[in-house]
Image: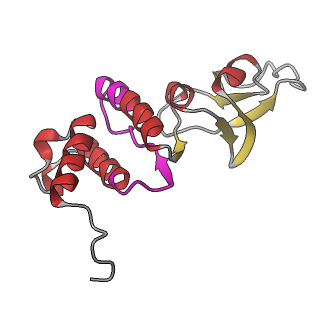
Amino acid sequence: ALFPGRRPAMAAIAQEVQLLASSLQLDGLLDRRPGQLSGGQRQRVALARAMIRKPAAFLMDEPLSNLDAKLRTEVRDELASLHQGLGSTFIYVTHDQSEAMTLSSRVAVMSAGRILQVAAPRELATERRHRVEVPGELRAGEANVHAVDLRRAAPAPTAAPPAATCEA
């Protein structure tokens, strides 16, 4: 062994796995193979596998996207408490404004690959600098996003197609 005596006891590992599995509602799934799991279950397993290692930073890209609404809320709350308990940095990529505002201590609003504003959620809610417009109908997965600086915004042309506006 490269570092003898540094591996935790098997009982401690099993206890930690059980705690994490129960917090992510994976209790009854520990003996299943990946092919036997749904997309949401696979996402939670991947999250648990990352968390068990206790890294200094996590990069999460839409980690709750495959979960139903009820489970998404529960896992979001659990993620927030795990974040506080682990003390690690979480970089959380999401298109869901409620996830961003409830999970974050700082939010970066991006459009077309550019950071438009970085602020605390409360500051973003009261002092928005940009409005994000989505021309036409809002459909999941299809959007042409344009950022508008609210301090210099001109009135929209009247001949433009109807736009759905999403405050960012």
24 left or right of 87? left
Question: What colouring method underlies this structural image?
Answer: secondary structure
Towards the viewer: 93 or 29? 29
* Residue found at x 40% / y 54%: 54
Kindly identify the residue that appears in the image at 75 percent across and 38 percent down: 116
Was residue 83 drawn as part of the magenta stretch in this picture? no
Taking the image as shown, residue 102 lies to the left or right of residue 161, namely left
The residue located at (27%, 67%) in the rendering is 7
Residue sitting at x 38%, y 38%: 64
* Residue in front for this viewpoint, 1 or 111: 1
Q: Quarter of the image for the N terminus: give it.
A: bottom left
User: What's drawn in magenta, residue-wise?
Assistant: 52-75
Disc tally is 0
Residue 18: x and y, percent? 19, 44
State which quarter of the image contains the C terminus. Answer: top right
Location of residue 136 in the rendering, given as x and y in whole percent from the top left corner: 61, 27
Residue 163, above or below 88 = above
Q: Nearer the viewer, residue 98 or 163?
A: 98
Q: Please state the horizontal and vertical placement of residue 6, each as a whole percent of the image.
A: 31, 69
